[in-house]
Image (tube, rainbow, N blue to C red):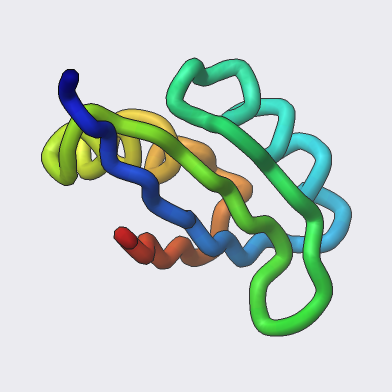
Amino acid sequence: MRLSQIAFILINCNAIDIDHVIASVGVSSEVVQAHKVEGPYDIILKINGEDVEKIKEFVSSNIKKIDKIKHSYVDNQ
C-alpha cells in the first residue's frame, strides 16, 4: 500500500476574493479541505498528493495560476 503526502497551503488574497479562490481550487481532486481563516493568511488548503513532486506540480499548475492569490506558502508534513 502506497502512502500519500499531505500538505497545507496557506494563501493570502483580498478579502473580496476569498470565495472565488476557494471555488477555483475546490474543484481539484487533490484538495481535501479548504477553510477561510483569520490572521496572517486568508485561506488554508489541505491537499493530498502521491508525493512531494506531485504536490509541487499541483501548486505550480493550479495555485500559481490563480491571479487573485497574492502569496502562497506550502507546508509539507
Residue 54 rendering spot, x and y as whole percentages: 20, 32
Q: Quadrant of residue 15?
A: bottom right
Q: Position of residue 51 (x, y in %)?
A: 17, 37
Q: Residue furthest bottom?
A: 40
- What quarter of the picture does the N terminus occupy? top left
Q: Name above or below for residue 38 compared with residue 53.
A: below
Residue in the image at 72% along x and 28% along y: 23
76 sits left or right of 23 in the view: left
Give the residue at the far front of this rendering. Answer: 1
Residue drawn at x 51%, y 39% as measured from the top left? 66
Residue sitting nearer the eye, 44 or 17 = 44
Could you tell me how many numbered marks the image carries? Answer: 0
- Up the image or down, 40 lies above or below 49; here it is below
Residue at the extreme right of the image, as rendered:
16
Between 4 and 38, the residue placed more toward the observer is 4
Q: Position of residue 21 (x, y in %)?
A: 68, 40
User: In the picture, residue 75 is in which quadrant?
Assistant: bottom left
Q: Residue at x 61, y 66 (%)?
A: 12
